[in-house]
Amino acid sequence: TRIKRTSSLDTDKTGNAPSHVYKVSWKGADWWQVGTYTGAQPKVLGKWEQTPGYDFDMHLFDNGQRMYASKDFYDPVKDRRILWGWGIIKNLDGVQTMPRVLSWDPKLRQIISSPIEEQDYLREKVLPTDTNIRLMNNETVSLSKSWPRGAGIQCEVEVK
C-alpha cells in the first residue's frame, strides 16, 4: 500500500520518508511494516527495503482480540485508505467491523486509524447526559441500561 505523500510526509529530519506500508494477517494477528518499495519492469519483482532512519520491524496492528482477517482498499474518490475486518464479539461470529481510515503519522512514525466520516450520518440524537458526577477513589458509576447496546459513549473527566 502506497503511503499518501503530503507536505508533512515528504521527508523527516533524515531527509527520507517511507514510501509504502506492508500489512499482513498472520498467526491470528494483523501486522504492519513501513519501508521503501522500488518498482521493476512488468513480471519482475520490485525491491522492498528499509527506509534509512526508520525501523524495519513488524508492528502489531491488532492481536486478534478484537478483529482478524482485515482487508484494506484505496478510495480514489476521497483519496484515502479504508480498512475493515471481521470483529470478535462474545457470542457472535462473523461480525463485520465498521470501516476505518488508515493514515501515517510522521511524528509518531506509526499508522493510525480513525472512523470514516460517513459514520457521522449513522448517529441520531445525543443520549441523556449525566453531569457533575463526583467519584471517590476506586468508585464506579454504571451507565443507564436504557442506552442501546453498542452506543458510542463520550466521557470528559476533570481531575482535581
Image (cartoon, helix red, strand yellow):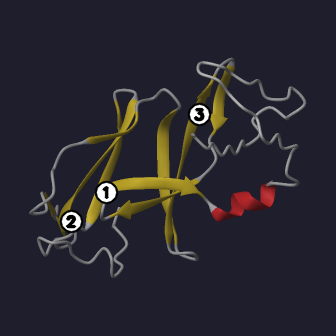
The disc placed on residue 108 is 1
Return the disc, 3 or 2, that comes first in the chain's sequence: 2
Residue drawn at 88 percent across, 54 percent down:
125
Q: Please identify the quarter of the rendering in which residue 105 is found.
A: bottom left
Q: How many marks?
A: 3
Q: Label 3's element?
A: strand
Q: Label 1's element?
A: loop
Position in image of residue 49 (x %, y %): 12, 58
Return the disc, 2 or 1, that comes first in the chain's sequence: 2
Mark 3–mark 2 distance (CA, rounded to whole Å)? 36 Å
Position in image of residue 73 (x %, y %): 49, 59
Position in image of residue 106 (x %, y %): 30, 65
Position in image of residue 124 (x %, y %): 87, 55
Q: Nearer the viewer, residue 116 or 13?
A: 13
Q: Where is 108 relative to 62, above or below? A: below
Q: Which class describes the residues within 10 Å of circle 1: few (<14), some (14-19), or many (20+)?
A: few
Q: Please identify the quarter of the rendering in which residue 52 is found.
A: bottom left
Discs 3, 2 touching: Cβ within 8 Å: no
Q: Where is 146 relative to 5, above or below? A: above
| Kind of residue at disc 2 | Lys
Image side of residue 101 versus residue 20, left or right: right
Q: Nearer the viewer, residue 110 or 131?
A: 131
Mark 1–mark 3 distance (CA, rounded to whole Å)? 26 Å
Discs 1, 3 touching: Cβ within 8 Å: no
Residue drawn at 59 percent across, 33 percent down:
87
Closer to the observer: label 2 or label 1?
A: 1
| Kind of residue at disc 1 | Leu
The disc placed on residue 43 is 2
Return the disc, 1 or 3, that comes first in the chain's sequence: 3
Q: What residue is shown with label 3? A: 87
Closer to the observer: label 1 or label 3?
A: 1
